[in-house]
Image (cartoon, rainbow, N blue to C red):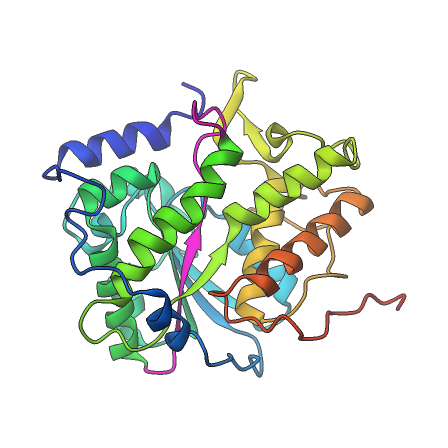
Amino acid sequence: MAGTIQRIAATLLALAAPACTGIGACAGPAPLDDAAMEALYAASNRLPDGPLSVFHLGHSLVGRDMPAMLAQLAGAGHEHASQLGWGASLKAHWGDAEIHGFAQENAHPRFRDAGQAVDSGDYDAIVLTEMVEIRDAIRHHASPDYLARWAGRAWRANPEVEVYLYETWHNIDDPEGWLARIDRDSATYWEGEILRRALAADGMERPIRVIPAGPVFARFVREAAARGGVDGVARTEDLFARTEDGGQDTIHVNDLGAYLAALTHYAVLYRRSPVGLPAELLRADGTDAVAPGPEAARLMQEVVWEIVSAHPRTGVDADRPERLTESE
């Protein structure tokens, strides 16, 4: 059963939706071309002038611990809430398919109904993510259409809100290769089939920023391996959880993976380098999370800023000064 929840949920959701003949066949309008994308993303984002209120919509690759870690990294005043499900798609959260695992995933004080949350206009940022397998999401669950729907709904409720697409990953035992999938899927599916098609929909005149966790994970794994490991982190598996019977969970992260994802969210949402931020944090339930060692933590922070500041869809300026550590 190790790491199968996402696959089961994806299969169940896929069976409930009509099949398309190709990846983009049910995806709506043609994707924006390069010139249109560059024009849309040309404006630089301003730095937030204070703590943010963030709503997370997704599934267990959001989880409870990552948003809690993000709140600690951001500091006093940061607020967050979420609606999750087992491998839930944007379509399911909209109400057009069943959200499996709804009761289990939302049994916590930070839950808020997604429709109420987005319609309230209470949030500075709405972070959306799609189910994986990402190709199934596009083929069977009209990912671009529902991304555009959620973004438009958020902007109608609050014209100042920023909307983000949280780019995740897939099973680490993927037969096509985990790193190869991230390298290909980022441009081909997350941007090419989902983001560009969503932004081509009527009324989509603002950018949806990207939180590129998948590329960050890939870069960190490669760098750690090239160094022969850092503080005991040497393989992809070192970022992922173990099942109750001790087996390898192939999709859900452990505390180290949650920390790396939280750093990525911090860098994009706050438009600041995470270099120098603390590594010893609490889980959502208040217990101590396993912290990366100092070398691993520093490498994570540097990799995050390297990827986020160079990514053309994050809204982060590449030449913005990095956060300084206390010693500097």
Q: Where is the N terminus found, in terms of image quarters?
A: top left
Q: Residue at x 73, y 42 (%)?
A: 292
Q: Nearer the viewer, residue 85 or 146?
A: 146
Q: Is residue 152 visible?
A: yes
**In the rendered view, would you say 32 is above or below 298?**
below
Answer whether residue 168 is magenta in the image.
Answer: yes
Magenta extent: 159-177
Q: Which quadrant of the structure image shows residue 324?
A: bottom right
Q: Residue at x 55, y 55 (%)?
A: 68
Q: Residue at x 33, y 48 (%)?
A: 130
The percent position of residue 289, horizontal first and vertical second, equals 66, 43
Number of residue marks: 0
Q: Which quadrant of the structure image shows residue 247?
A: top right
Outermost residue toward the right in this view: 327
The percent position of residue 206, horizontal first and vertical second, equals 34, 76
**In the rendered view, would you say 319 is above or below 97?**
below
88 with respect to 219 (left or right) = left
Q: Where is the C terminus found, in terms of image quarters?
A: bottom right
The percent position of residue 293, horizontal first and vertical second, equals 79, 42
301 with respect to 120 (left or right) = right
**In the rendered view, would you say 45 is above or below 195?**
below
**In the rendered view, would you say 34 is above or below 90?**
below
Q: Main secondary structure of the magenta part?
A: loop
Answer whether residue 315 is magenta in the image.
Answer: no
260 with respect to 130 (left or right) = right
Q: Nearer the viewer, residue 183 or 128?
A: 183
42 with respect to 122 (left or right) = right
Q: Which quadrant of the structure image shows residue 134?
A: top left
Outermost residue toward the left in this view: 18
The percent position of residue 33, horizontal first and vertical second, equals 31, 65
